[in-house]
Image: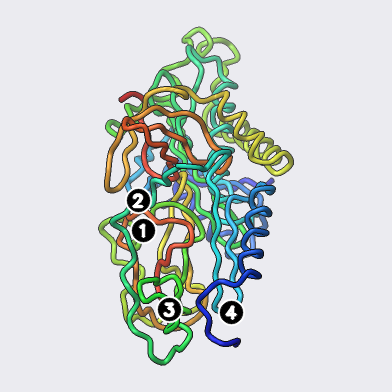
Amino acid sequence: MAKENSEPTAKDLKFVKELMVLLEDSSLTEIDFQKGDLGISLSKSGPSSSGVQHIMAAPAAAAPAPAAAPSMPVAAVEKPSDAASHPGAVKSPMVGTAYTRPSPDAETFVNVGDKVKEGDTIMLIEAMKTFNPIVAPKSGKIEQVLVDDASAVEFGEALFIIV
Amino acid sequence: MKFFQYEALGSTSVEADRLFDSGEAPAFWVRADQQTAGRGRRGREWSSPKGNFYGTACYAFDGKPNEAAKLSFVAAIAVAKTLNAYTLTSEPTLKWPNDVLIDGRKIAGLLLEAKPGRVLIGIGINLISHPDGGNVPPTHLLEHMDPAVLNSEEPEFTGVEGVLAILAREFDQAFRRHLAYGFSATRADWTALSKGIPGPVTVRLPDETFTGEAQSLLENGALRVVAGDGTIRDVHAGDVFSGS
């Protein structure tokens, strides 16, 4: 890892610009780039995205800060309020409504502290009446669930943290 | 295309998923005369008495989640075209994202599930009866068919298996068109069948309800609405009702 440096370099900015052009010129609506501890999420919502409010981004649904993770120096250099930068954070692949239980009166898929296996369903995200299971990307323990049942989530928003 | 038909199932979508998991190769359809645990959105019960259509298509699909969501529109188009195979007193119309209505009343319910390697398209169509209640007043197919057509020597409506045959063909066509020409083609087809866009809508979200003017279906599948306060809001999930 290079020396810790939170200021974006000219090279970083050029790269982001290139990504923006790539997104603008493509039929894609979202680009999520990850390399090491660098994460860039770009999304566009339609033909003219200026001034558009994605309404599934409820302001009240701001993710709580992740628990301090002293054993993970990578997280320490990130903004503490940014759960999405936690190395164990699993992010929403889409804009939609997150469901932490299969139906309103059912038990939640998981609770904090549960051990889960890779591929286990942790929650569902619905958009346009299509349900997508969000599964554990690896086996581990659920450290935090960052969204409430039936809450609006944004693309790239941290949903839960698995360690 | 294979068809698995049952007298009764808990849920056609659960059975379709089980068949996929046990090695059945998509595409295939599962249909049941009745469901004992039919599901609507959020675990709402989908009343499933005999005589109506309950089926699930399982298609191979490995797209990203937001790509799977666009199949909601493909399925709605297929259902509208299926209903149009019958001589109706008025044409079916679509409401965002996949409600199918006749005379403003809901005739079909669609629910999709995207899982690794496949997408399940669950479709319920009221044919000979409809349950009471729901967010939108319900209806059923026979109520919108001319009695003369129904009672002719060669009746148009012959029951659920006939509906499955038409629906399977229409969905397959719409799906292949979507893959070949992309969402812009699907969006154009959906828009042509939709009603009330542009027009006033009420949008119900988990934490908020607002009114505004629906403008268009966007390239990402969201419905663009100009809210009463002038802000542009793109609806990705939630319930949208015509009128304000």
The image position of residue B30, as x and y in percent, is 55, 47
| Residue at mark 1 shares a chain with residue at mark 2 | no
User: How far separated are the C-alphas under marks 1 and 3?
Assistant: 17 Å
Q: Which mark lies nearer to you, 2 or 4?
A: 4
| B191 lies left or right of A111 | right
Mark yes or no: residue A46 visible: yes
Depth order, front residue of B128/B99: B99
Query: Which quadrant would the C terminus of chain B be assigned to in this image?
Result: top left
Q: Provide the secondary structure element on which disc 4 rests.
A: loop
The image position of residue A14, as x and y in percent, is 66, 64
Look at label 4 and name its amino acid.
Gly
How many dots with numbers? 4
Q: Which residue is mark 1?
A: A99
| Residue at mark 1 shares a chain with residue at mark 3 | yes
User: How far separated are the C-alphas under marks 1 and 2?
Assistant: 9 Å
Query: Which quadrant would the N terminus of chain B be assigned to in this image?
Result: top right
Q: Which mark is residue A36?
A: 4
The relative height of residue A92 versus residue B150 in the rendered view (above or below) is below
Q: Provide the secondary structure element on which disc 2 rests.
A: helix
Contact check, label 1 and label 2, Cβ < 8 Å: yes
| Residue at mark 3 shares a chain with residue at mark 2 | no
The image position of residue B55, as x and y in percent, is 51, 43
Disc with the residue nearer the chain's start (1 vs 3): 1
Q: Which mark is residue B42?
A: 2
The residue lying at 60 percent from left, 86 percent from top is A2
User: How far separated are the C-alphas under marks 4 and 3?
Assistant: 17 Å
Q: Which mark lies nearer to you, 1 or 3?
A: 3
Depth order, front residue of B35/B174: B174
